[in-house]
Image (spheres, grey):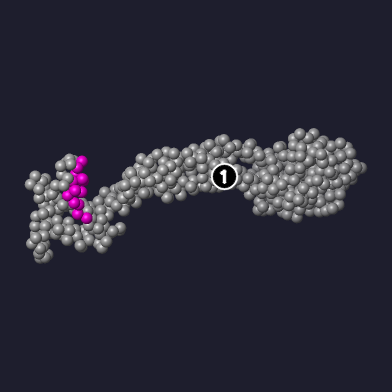
Amino acid sequence: MIHLDTVSWRRARKDPAPVLSRLSFSVPQGGFRWLLGPSGAGKSSLLSLLHVETLPTSGRMVVLGQPVNDEQKRATFVMLRRRIGMIHQDFRLMPGLSVADNIALPMRLQNRPEDEIRDEIRSILKWVGLSEYHDAPAERLSGGEQQRTAIARAIIHRPGLILADEPTNALEESQAHRLLDMFAELSAMGSTVIVATHNEALVRRLPHPALFLERGHLVSDETPPL
Amino acid sequence: MSRRSTRRRDGLSLSETLPDRGLFALVAMVGFLAALTLAGACGARALSARWAGGAAQLVVIQVPQPDQPARQASGGVQAPGEQSRADAVQAALVSLPAGSIVHRLSAQELGNLLEPWLGSGLKGQTATSPSAMPLPAVLRVELPDSTLPPATLEQDLSAVAPGVIVERNSLWSTRLHALANSLLACAGLALLSVCGVATLITGLTTRAGLASRRDVITTLHGLGASDGYIAGRFARRTASLAFGGGLTGTVLACVPLFALLQITAPFTAEADGVPATATQNSLTGQDAFLGSMPSDLLIGLGCLPLAAALICWLTTQLIVRLWLRRLP
């Protein structure tokens, strides 16, 4: 469950205007939300906030049932981030590591057994169509392949919350549709999914409630008109 | 795939971030200095102990005209008629603390003692020889540890042998002890400075490593890496480099230390009652080095690489954890 109550966020305390201003919305566990809005509206900032990469400047925020504020212990945020799968716009793959090692990172950081990690990698690589790139260095892949690797890394540990920032940018249409189907499946299995996108065709294909952001303000929290 | 090898595949690439050359070489130099400083500290401490235990407990008594008959003590006790002044003084020393060792230097020992000033003609001379230079009898008194001669010792001895001279070393000993303690304090400060330099070097290296891996660390942090994991990875790397550097520096410092111990061996051996030649002849090579090295210095040198590793590990842990504080 995600709940924001008049949450604001400034990049620096002295900044005159907040990047995100008095956002209030809720997403139930297993819910799916599109995050829409023009460039610079604050979509990526909101996803970073939900990923606990930064803390709200004011307001009350609860992610996966856990209050997020500066009174919490750091270990709480570490455990929370382990339950979130984040797909960044710039992929953020580890240079010098193979595709398999990149995908394995979230599970290895949780000290999961190597046998289990190997099995999961095999099946997820097959699913994203990168089986033949198991040992390939991540930086040698094409943009689309890197994006699929980043997606595989974000979902391999079955996170309770999936945050995706323009996840279909570098994907072909068929792959984008497959990805959306997978998000819908994960949502149905209980994961909360929030996807920021500019791709209206995708939104039309998968009608779900959307959060519209404009200049850091939430202007609408409804299912988009078809 | 072992657990150890998989844990390291996290993109930090610390062998590139914290390369061997810089930290290893700097810690080796610091280790070299620390080893020499440690040797200095051990030397100062040994010197202090020797001075405290030796000079302070030593009293030298000179009895002029030793063979003249002693006079009656003021207390009314008559010295035996045939008793010489020297014998009377020696007999009066029974009032010293139990365990005191009184030794009257023989004519031969006295001759050896004065040979540098008066030549070898004095050897074998006795006070009764016609051409004899009038020599006093010299009594060497070693007091047990932590005891002092009676304050009235000179007065008591003068009663049986007027003109007796009592030389107490306690004043010199106090000054020497203070000097040795000052040397020890200086060595301690130098050792602290060396530790400070090691900390500074580690801090700068770690900060440079953090700056060059900022993006990777941020991503790892986002994937759920704890502060302890990231700090531990950096700390293990700097500690292993510091251990290697400290070991190299210590081994290198053994060369000048060995030379120094060879030079000082005659003094320490003779002071310990062992002929210097015997010490030098019976030991060779590594045995000679280990044999001549004081055990506390040997232990200190053995601990140096571990101490360097510990300092670097703690410094890195602190700096990385503080750096990570900027992330939630």
> Which residue is at 34% across, 51% downward?
B49
Residue A217, picture quadrant: top right
Q: Is residue B178 left or right of residue B135?
A: right
Q: Taking B75 as reference, is A53 above or below it?
A: above
> Which residue is at 55% across, 47% downward?
B314
Q: In the image, residue A182 lies at what x, y percent?
A: 86, 46
Q: In the image, residue A103 lies at what x, y percent?
A: 76, 44
- Of B29 and A219, which appears nearest the observer? B29
- Of A168 and B126, which appears nearest the observer? B126
- Looking at the image, how many numbered discs can be counted on the residues? 1
Q: Does any portion of residue B74 appear in the rendered image?
A: no
Q: How many other residues sit within 10 Å of disc 1, few (<14), some (14-19) or many (≥20)?
A: many
> Which residue is at 58% across, 46% downward?
B317
What secondary structure is the stretch in magenta mostly built from? helix
Q: In the image, residue B166 lies at what x, y percent?
A: 19, 53
Residue labelled with disc 1: B239
Q: In the image, residue B132 lies at what x, y percent?
A: 10, 46
Q: Specify the subunit that label 1 lies on.
A: B
Outermost residue on the bottom side: it is B76
Q: Which residues are magenta?
A: B103-116
> Which residue is at 14% across, 58% downward?
B87
Disc 1 residue type? Answer: Ala
Q: Taking B22 as reference, is B184 above or below it?
A: below
Q: Is residue A2 left or right of residue A16?
A: right
Q: Taking A65 as reference, is B247 above or below it?
A: above
Outermost residue on the front side: it is B282
- Of A112 and A61, which appears nearest the observer? A112
Q: Say what secondary structure mark 1 lies in.
A: helix
